Image (cartoon, helix red, strand yellow):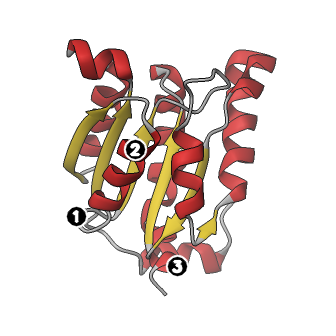
Amino acid sequence: METQSTKEHKTHSKKHIDFGIITVSTSRNAKGGRDTSGDNLAHSIENHHYCVAKRTIVPDNKNQIKNKVLEYLDAVDIIITTGGTGIAKTDITVEAVRPLFDKELESFNTIFMIKSHESIGTASMLSRACAGIIKGKVVFCLPGSPDACALAIEKIILKEAGHILKHAGE
């Protein structure tokens, strides 16, 4: 399904990619509970021979989320946040991160919704997953659900990581 042009771009894209994972969860931050979504993301990234260079848990706090994303920009190529993309009052990851985008990758949400709908049906509309470019780095904001994270990382992000970075840095 890929065009020859896409294949060529992927051939010349970055091979070593450093990822940062930011789990957004007030309860996990305070109680130190298991971070299943973060663990699964890290496992998938490392299985594809990429590096998880930074990882942390922050509470559902707009300034802390924003500041952690800005901090990670100096250390990694791709940042993945997990949690805070739903519709509850405490879900503020999108509000914290989206204003930082130089460019938004609107199609990420569309592809994610289509693939989510195949798995969970119309409940997929409750997610506000998004992605964008900040200073040549890529940021993905994913739901906190382990299944949603697995879908996004395996079926979308890792397939295009190098390709997106190639163009984000141009």
Residue 92, given in percent of the width and then of the height, sits at: 55, 35
Q: How crowded is mark 1: few (under 14 residues within 10 Å), some or many (20 or more)?
A: some
Q: Residue at x 59, y 45 (%)?
A: 95
User: Gap in Å between the C-alphas at discs 2 and 1?
Assistant: 16 Å
Q: What element carries label 1?
A: loop
Pair 3/2: label in front? 2
- Please report the residue visible at 55 percent of the width from the left and 73 percent of the height from the top: 7
* Foreground disc of the pair 1, 3: 1
Asked which quadrant contains residue 40, the reply is top left
| Of 84 and 151, the residue lying toward us | 84
- The picture places residue 155, in percent across and down from the top left corner, at 54, 41
Tag count: 3
Mark 3, residue position: 167
Residue 75: assigned label: 1
Q: Residues within 10 Å of mark 3 (few under 14, many from 20)?
A: few
Q: Earlier in the sequence, mark 3 or mark 2?
A: 2
Left or right: 86 as drawn, with respect to 29: right
Residue type of the residue flagged with mark 3: His
Asked whether the viewer can see residue 34, the reply is: no
The percent position of residue 102, horizontal first and vertical second, equals 57, 72
Q: Which of marks 2 and 1 is nearer the N terminus?
A: 2
The residue sitting at the right extreme is 122
Is 61 or 53 nearer to us in this picture? 61
Q: Quadrant of the N terminus?
A: bottom right
Say above or below: 62 vs 119: below
Q: Please report the residue visible at 45 percent of the width from the left and 21 percent of the height from the top.
A: 146
**Which is in the foreground here, disc 2 or disc 1?**
2
The amino acid on which the numbered mark 1 sits, given as a three-letter code, is Ala
Which residue has dot 2 on it? 65
Q: Is residue 69 above or below residue 23?
A: below
The span from disc 3 to disc 2 (Cα, nearest Å) is 26 Å
